[in-house]
Amino acid sequence: MGNPRESELHYPLGETLPAPGEALDLAPGVRWVRMGLPFALDHINLWLLRDRIDGREGWTIVDCGIASDDTRANWEKVFAERLDGLPVLRVMATHFHPDHLGLAHWLTERWGCRLWVSATDFNLARLASSSTVGMGGASAAAFFGSHGLTDPDSLDKIRARADYYPKMVPVVPAAYRRLMDGTEVEIGGRSWRCIAGYGHAPEHISLFCEEAKLLISGDMVLPRISTNVSVVDVEPEADPLTLYLQSLTRYLDLPADTLVLPSHGKPFTGLHQRIDQLREHHDERLAEVAAACRTEPTHAAGLLGVLFKRKLDLHQTTFAMGEAIAHLHALWLQGGLKRMRGDDGVYRFSAAD
Ligand SMILES: [Zn+2]
């Protein structure tokens, strides 16, 4: 969904983008790499940070891209042309999603270096890459069915999509180094502080460098689209929207003129405005959901037309269902709505007594 208040943000590089396989200088020792993705969201930004570890000069990579021949070829081009002849010394992942962690195994093998990531996301990536837990398949179809998605064709496709995660993340490194909220990581002589965020991934890590006033925001703060916040079948009563909105307040402590390096879109300033916009966006969606549920008991599938005023493909429908359930759960678990399960097995939400 677009950002109607995008003009309040500032893009210091204008329309400049790195082509695939290139790396654009952003700040001293910081380079911007952009890789393609096979989704409606067609790219991810990855970052190169000049580093020195155990007495060796080289680079830290933040986020990896999905496991595909294209992405590997573009990385090879970056390695050949844009590392100044130095090795990669460390790979970091902001969270476990395939576009961020997909090539972590290949990169760490290729360079004989360590993956740094939160423990929660590391363990979930290991599980998801070796099984079908929570990433499509029968349990996802049953979960969406219990929230009113009845179209047999969509449910069949969701059932058939059990290999969604392993396809893009075939292997996860067997060992890692743990990032936690507040961890200070020294990168190239500068300190970067980890900020844990919730609601998008189990334990998403953003990195903030006070000295350079740079925030690698991952997927927690994006300039144009709102971060996906979804309930999924592994944790069917979750309240990720409340967690996400609470997490956003953490970024308000950072300087207003911080340059934000997001995973999707372009580097921007206007962090505090963006947080205000995201809060407003979700407040409006919550109000729409509450109004619909006050009119009549409503299930999540019944909200798709209210929340997403456009035609959705299957991939978008599963995201949209997750988002609709997240808004219902925020209201339900805060006491604004009550939940009832009908004879048809579907959860409907209505005004609390
Ligand atoms: Zn993500």
Image (cartoon, grey):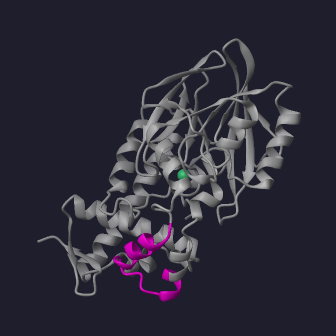
Query: What residue is rendered at 79% in x and 37% in y?
Result: 24
Which residues fall within the magenta stretch?
A: 136-155
Secondary structure mainly formed by the magenta segment: helix
Q: Residue furthest right?
A: 81
Name the residue nearer the viewer: 324 or 8.
Answer: 324
Residue 14 visible in this rendered orientation of the protein? no
Quarter of the image where one finds residue 31: top right
Quarter of the image where one finds residue 84: top right
Report whether 164 appears left or right of 83: left
Report whether 51 appears left or right of 289: right
Name the residue nearer the viewer: 211 or 318.
Answer: 318
Up/down of 264 relative to 326, above or below = above
Relative image position of residue 4 (x, y in whole percent): 54, 61
Report whether 263 appears left or right of 82: left
Relative image position of residue 252 (x, y in whole percent): 43, 36
| Quarter placement of the N terminus | bottom right
Q: Is residue 61 magenta?
A: no
Query: What residue is rendered at 39% in x and 43% in y?
Result: 247
Relative image position of residue 32 (x, y in whole percent): 73, 39
Quarter of the image where one finds residue 59: top right
Relative image position of residue 62 (x, y in whole percent): 64, 36
Query: What residue is rendered at 22% in x and 78% in y?
Result: 341
Query: What residue is rendered at 43% in x and 27% in y?
Result: 182
Up/down of 3 relative to 255, above or below = below
Name the residue nearer the viewer: 126 or 15.
Answer: 126
Residue 158 visible in this rendered orientation of the protein? yes
